[in-house]
């Protein structure tokens, strides 16, 4: 989508980022460094090199004075002179890197991202660097290890434990760790208060420390990879198409769930890695990484660098360093891994291309998928975009011929696609969300030794608490939303702002009994456990998987088949492979039928197809039951008769007729303020500013209230810009952004710009 744009930006002068301050007395300088500093301003800043230090090269970090503080920044370019008068240019305090941490290609991607999303370049740099580097720590940090001394080893732990239990706890931990001890970071994680116990132990000579500088971490020994299955004809065709291609090419691997997309990735990776190149694999969610990583590792016999939000800062830096040094043969990571330096990348794979978590929804609102495509184009390598439910954007590119459509229409290994059936909620009563036909199907599948998955995209016990007498509904005091009942910890919680309060049994208005209305995953879990008391039920949602390791544990229970009934939100619908699963129940699909967003039907079809894809992946056929109160809605006929292909074709035709993306481009400006008036006034002024630019074919829609007009105590409004001409739209944004940064009215509100937004309502 933004690829053709690359060319356009090559001609855009850097001048749009560094605003000229014209000064006739500007003193000519030979070595000015342009530094991206992590501040919300769309420009870079000029500095002289640190006194006595050599000129830092682009991509190196420097410590610079910024206002009254010091900040870590990254040199983006060198310049002969500054537009600032000579006496205004300050010196860097220090150069932090002897060699650049970011290469020219990395800086290119950062600059592109900043330009395309109209986001301050310093903040893009910050998003691209691991936290420790952002903070100015060394690329090869010194690790302090705490160890038990000989005297420590001879200490009577029991005696120590009686006098000083904390000291004993720390000493025991170090003794267990053996000769190398434990590094400070790990120690802090395992025993947050260890420093207090360490002092007396050190004084008694029972513990000591040593330092080690980490260079490239020890590379895992390659092992023999396992052979894969023989590819079927469709898979071979896909692999050959990518292999035969020279230079940049975008390949949409459109394969039904279980069609063997991962096998295609593997074959391509083998070849690219065999040729001595690196592969970048992007996955939408951290929850999916362990499964995929272990499969890739096992098959390729190589250890990847893994990058996701669940790592400690040190682990993250370590993986980043292995990628950057070229030692990691492949990198598997979530969204921000798209920025990982890879000196020798030969292939990029984006798995589950349709997934919304590939787009960051706050701060720098980038699409990792789109940046992956841009990066591949810049370097001149193929990018493979896999999905069972490709986005309309990708399908549109395939139609116009700019991307290559590779289809895997059948499940690999001969498994049958699951049969989809509707349960009419008007003809049956659903008790705690489960209708009789669904309950009967569950019993039947369990009886036949299968596993079942019940999908409900609503966590908590019940989405509403209502008074049986006066009808009062518990609402969030800070948002336009209802409080969700969480029965386990007897709380009412707002899922939008996180506020919570104790759950009362009586109505705050009239004192009568209240009751939870509707169902969330907790209630469903309880109801199913009650109906099937001898079966093991597990729930997988963001509440149940908060504890570290909980997700992995739940998934392995599910994969082994130890839990027979799985209850979960969309977290459970993605990419997982449960060999024994034969029935999927979709508890409530109706919300998506009437969504206000033009993407509702695409999204509903995607989520149903994805979760349905969990059923019947091996020899036993799968079945999918969808509960709906609107069985006659034609969405169902299209989905059941024509599948995702039909739904997506119809949706594309509709988008073309109504001029929505991918036939037009969007940008959304949001604002939030304590007073509704301020949120609107700001956008009203922006609207006027844009209209004054008199751009042909640009529609400016709004300002209107955001769909949830009040959230966390702030009123929210939005302004939508739409144009069929992307360059015209971006030219407007490029003029708008710096103006807004200087606009005093903008300080009254929180505003943000979302280019190619995927959530409008
Ligand atoms: P997807 O990524 O499209 O969901 P996978 O690559 O995970 O599909 O494949 C689904 C299942 O089919 C896996 O168990 C995989 O080992 C198996 N499989 C894939 N390709 C083949 C093939 N050519 N022959 C036999 N089994 C295959
Ligand atoms: Zn709230």
Image (tube, rainbow, N blue to C red):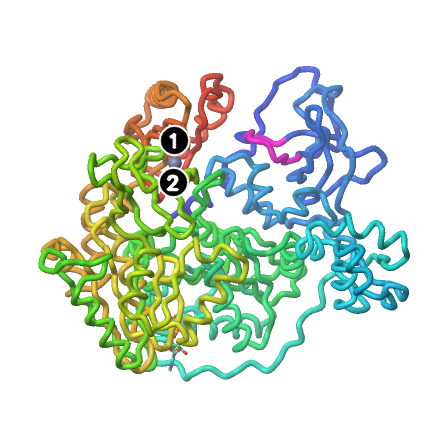
Our reading of the magenta stretch's main secondary structure is loop
Q: Quadrant of residue 560?
A: bottom left
Residue 617 showing in the rendered view = yes
Up-down relation of residue 727 to residue 281 (above or below): above
- Label 1 sits on a secondary structure element that is loop
Q: Quadrant of residue 207?
A: bottom right
For marks 1 and 2 on the same chain, the one whose residue lies earlier in the sequence: 1
Residue 618 point in image, percent of width and height:
33, 79
Q: Residue at x 42, y 34 (%)?
A: 753
- The image's mark for residue 478 is 1
Confirm if mark 1 falls within 8 A of ligand 2. yes
Foreground residue among 100 and 23: 100
- For label 2, the crowd category at 10 Å Cα-Cα, with few meaning under 14, some 14 to 19 and many 20 or more, is many
Residue 314 point in image, percent of width and height:
67, 54
Confirm if mark 2 falls within 8 A of ligand 2. yes
Residue 619 point in image, percent of width and height:
31, 82
Foreground residue among 96 and 218: 218
CA gap between label 1 and label 2 equals 9 Å
- Label 2 sits on a secondary structure element that is loop
Q: How many discs mark residues in the rendered view? A: 2
In this picture, which residue range is highlighted in magenta?
Answer: 35-44
Q: Residue at x 41, y 24 (%)?
A: 673
List the residue tagged with mark 2: 494
Ligand 2, seen in the image, is in the quarter at top left
Q: Quadrant of residue 222?
A: bottom right
Q: Is residue 325 magenta?
A: no
- Name the side, left or right, on which 86 lies relative to 273: right
For the residues bearing labels 1 and 2, Cβ distance under 8 angstroms: yes
Q: Residue at x 72, y 39 (%)?
A: 62
- The image's mark for residue 651 is none
């Amino acid at each position: 989508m933004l690829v053709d744009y690359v060319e356009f930006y090559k001609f855009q002068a850097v001048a749009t980022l560094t605003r000229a301050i014209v000064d006739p007395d500007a003193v000519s300088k030979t070595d000015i460094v342009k530094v991206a500093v992590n501040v919300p301003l769309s420009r870079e800043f000029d500095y002289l090199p640190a006194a006595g230090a050599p000129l830092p090269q682009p991509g190196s970090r420097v410590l610079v004075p910024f206002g009254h503080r010091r900040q870590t920044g990254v040199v983006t370019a060198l310049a002969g002179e500054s537009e600032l008068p000579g006496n205004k240019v300050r010196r860097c305090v220090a150069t932090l890197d002897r060699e650049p941490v970011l290469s020219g290609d990395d800086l290119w991607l950062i600059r592109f991202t900043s330009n395309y999303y109209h986001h301050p370049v310093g903040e893009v740099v910050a998003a691209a660097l691991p936290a420790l580097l952002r903070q100015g720590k060394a690329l090869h940090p010194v690790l302090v290890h705490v160890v038990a001394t000989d005297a420590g080893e001879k200490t009577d732990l029991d005696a120590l434990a009686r006098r000083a239990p904390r000291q004993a706890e720390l000493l025991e931990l170090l003794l267990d760790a053996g000769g190398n001890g434990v590094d400070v970071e790990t120690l802090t994680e395992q025993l947050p208060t260890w420093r207090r116990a360490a002092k007396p132990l050190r004084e008694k000579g029972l513990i000591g420390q040593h330092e080690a500088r980490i260079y490239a971490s020890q590379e895992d020994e390659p092992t023999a990879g396992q052979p894969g299955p023989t590819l079927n004809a469709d898979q071979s065709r896909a692999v050959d198409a990518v292999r035969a291609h020279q230079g940049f090419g975008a390949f949409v691997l459109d394969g039904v769930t279980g069609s063997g997309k991962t096998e295609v990735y593997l074959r391509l990776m083998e070849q690219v890695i065999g040729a001595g190149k690196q592969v970048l694999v992007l996955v939408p969610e951290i929850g999916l990484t362990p499964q995929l990583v272990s499969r890739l590792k096992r098959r390729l016999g190589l250890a990847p660098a893994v990058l996701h939000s669940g790592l400690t800062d040190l682990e993250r830096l370590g993986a980043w360093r292995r990628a950057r040094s070229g030692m990691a043969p492949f990198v598997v990571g979530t969204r921000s891994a798209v920025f990982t330096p890879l000196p020798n990348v030969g292939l990029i794979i984006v798995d589950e291309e349709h997934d919304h978590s590939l787009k960051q929804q706050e701060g720098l609102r980038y699409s990792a998928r789109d940046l992956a495509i841009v990066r591949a184009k810049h370097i001149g390598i193929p990018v493979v975009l896999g999905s069972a439910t490709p986005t309309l954007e990708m399908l549109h590119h395939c139609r116009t011929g700019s991307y290559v459509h590779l289809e895997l229409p059948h499940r690999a290994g001969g498994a049958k696609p699951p049969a989809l059936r509707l349960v009419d909620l008007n003809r049956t009563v659903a008790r705690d969300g489960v209708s009789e036909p669904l309950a009967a199907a569950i019993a039947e599948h369990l009886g036949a030794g299968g596993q079942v998955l019940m999908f409900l995209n609503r966590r908590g016990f019940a989405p509403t608490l209502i008074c049986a007498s006066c009808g009062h509904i518990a609402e969030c005091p800070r948002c336009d939303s209802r409080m969700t009942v969480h029965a386990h910890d007897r709380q009412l919680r707002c899922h939008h702002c996180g506020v919570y309060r104790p759950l009362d049994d009586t109505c705050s208005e009239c004192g009568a009994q209240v009751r939870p209305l509707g169902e969330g995953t907790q209630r469903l879990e309880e109801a199913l456990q009650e109906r099937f008391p001898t079966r093991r039920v597990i729930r997988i949602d963001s509440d149940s998987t908060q504890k570290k390791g909980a997700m992995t544990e739940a998934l392995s229970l599910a994969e082994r088949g130890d839990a027979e009934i799985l209850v979960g939100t969309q977290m459970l619908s993605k990419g997982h492979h449960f060999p024994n699963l034969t029935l999927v129940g979709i508890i409530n699909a109706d919300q998506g039928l009437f969504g206000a967003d033009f993407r509702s039907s695409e999204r509903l079809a995607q989520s149903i197809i994805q979760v349905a894809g969990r059923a019947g992946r091996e020899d036993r056929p799968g079945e999918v039951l969808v509960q709906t109160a609107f069985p006659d809605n034609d969405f169902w006929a299209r989905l059941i008769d024509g599948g995702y292909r039909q739904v997506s074709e119809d949706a594309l035709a509709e988008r073309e007729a109504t001029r929505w993306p991918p036939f037009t481009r969007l940008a959304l400006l949001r604002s939030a303020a304590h007073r509704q008036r301020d949120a609107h006034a700001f956008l009203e002024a922006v609207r006027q500013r844009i209209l004054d630019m008199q751009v042909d074919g640009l529609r400016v829609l709004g300002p209107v209230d955001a769909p949830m007009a009040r959230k966390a105590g702030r009123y929210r409004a939005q302004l939508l810009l739409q144009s069929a001409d992307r360059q015209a739209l971006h030219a407007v944004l490029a003029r708008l952004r710096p103006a807004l940064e200087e606009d005093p009215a903008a300080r009254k509100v929180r505003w943000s710009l979302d280019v190619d937004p995927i959530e409008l309502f």
